[in-house]
Every structure is written in C-alpha cells, then in structure tokens.
C-alpha cells in the first residue's frame, strides 16, 4: 500500500502496526507504519499514521540510548499483545525533537510495545519509577546523537 507521509513523501507500507486503543492523546488513530530515518541504522524511527498523512511521531530505539533499559509489562498488557514475556516484544520511545538537539527529550516511561510477529502494538505506562517521561538526550552520554 502506498502511503503519503509527513517526513518521507510517498512510500510503500507493507507492514502496518495496529493499536487497538490508539496512542495516548490520539486514541482514534489505530494504524501506523514504522519507518526508519535514513542513516540512523534503525535507532531513529517514525510512527506514521496510515489515516492522517500529517500525523507522525519521532521515536527512538531506547536500547540505543540505554542498553540496560528493561521495560516490564503487566500480565494484562502481555495478553493483549499475545506474548508471555516482555522480552518477546520490540520497544520504541517517543521523542520530542528540539533545537539544539541536546534539549530533545525521550519518553522512557511510556514506550510503545510491538509484537513484531502479529503487528499488534500498544503504548504502555511502566510502573517502575526508574524511567521518566522527559529524559534529555544530552543525559545519555557524549556519543553521536541519532537526531
């Protein structure tokens, strides 16, 4: 399926992700295509709405920023995503991009969990107090920023 996007123009979207409850604040948006920004080696991505071309969310691979990131979902969330363990899922953290890039933030508290086998996805709120909604990119070290 050809999809008009916010950042990439018209692209082929062969694998759509289905959010039964949408994303927080965008509950009516149920289908997204996950696209990778060129040159990011899969660390910087875009959740592009299938229904709304101008709606897209920048996301990051949280393990790129924090290799010991360990999101644990509730039994109810695991059941909804049709897995038995959080380690069976892919996780993405939404990012608010600012200028300068070091002031950009990443939400590690409310990641998007994806069952790559079924295409089911959901945004969750982690119960652990270790992760916050606004981690500054600059707090993750002095390496190259993927943004």
Image (cartoon, grey):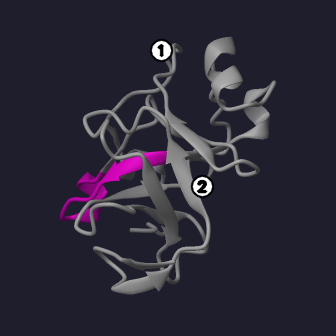
- Asked if residue 39 lies in the magenta stretch, the reply is no
Disc on res. 44: none
**Dot placed on the residue nearer the N-terminal end, 2 or 1:** 2
Q: Which residues are magenta?
A: 93-104
The reply to whether residue 65 is in sight is no
Location of residue 34 in the rendering, given as x and y in whole percent from the top left corner: 51, 63
Residue 110 visible at all: yes
Q: Is residue 100 magenta?
A: yes
Reply above or below: 131 against 44.
above
Label 2 sits on a secondary structure element that is: helix
Q: Which residue is mark 1?
A: 129
Distance of mark 2 from mark 1, alpha carbons? 20 Å
Q: Is residue 70 left or right of residue 103?
A: right
Q: To which quarter of the image does residue 46 belong? A: bottom left
To which quarter of the image does residue 115 belong?
top right
Q: Quadrant of residue 66?
A: top right
Residue at 30% over, 40% down = 28
Residue 25 locus on image (x, y percent): 25, 35
Viewer-nearest residue: 61 or 67: 61
Identified at 56% across, 60% down, the residue is: 16
- The residue depicted at 47 percent of the width and 45 percent of the height is 93
Vertical arrangement, residue 78 with respect to residue 104, above or below: above
């Amino acid at each position: 399926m050809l999809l008009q996007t916010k950042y990439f123009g018209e692209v082929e979207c062969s694998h759509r992700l289905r959010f039964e409850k949408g994303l927080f604040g965008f509950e009516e948006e149920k289908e997204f295509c996950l696209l990778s920004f060129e040159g990011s080696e899969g660390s910087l991505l875009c959740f592009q709405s299938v229904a709304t071309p101008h709606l897209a969310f920048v996301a990051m691979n949280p393990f790129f920023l924090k290799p010991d990131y360990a999101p644990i979902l509730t039994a109810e969330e695991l059941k909804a995503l049709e897995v038995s363990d959080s380690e069976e899922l892919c996780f993405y953290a939404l990012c608010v991009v600012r200028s300068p890039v070091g002031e950009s933030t990443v939400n590690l508290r409310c990641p998007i969990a994806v069952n790559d086998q079924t295409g089911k996805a959901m945004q969750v709120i982690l119960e652990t107090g270790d992760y916050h909604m606004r981690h500054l990119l600059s707090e993750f070290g002095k390496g190259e920023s993927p943004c």
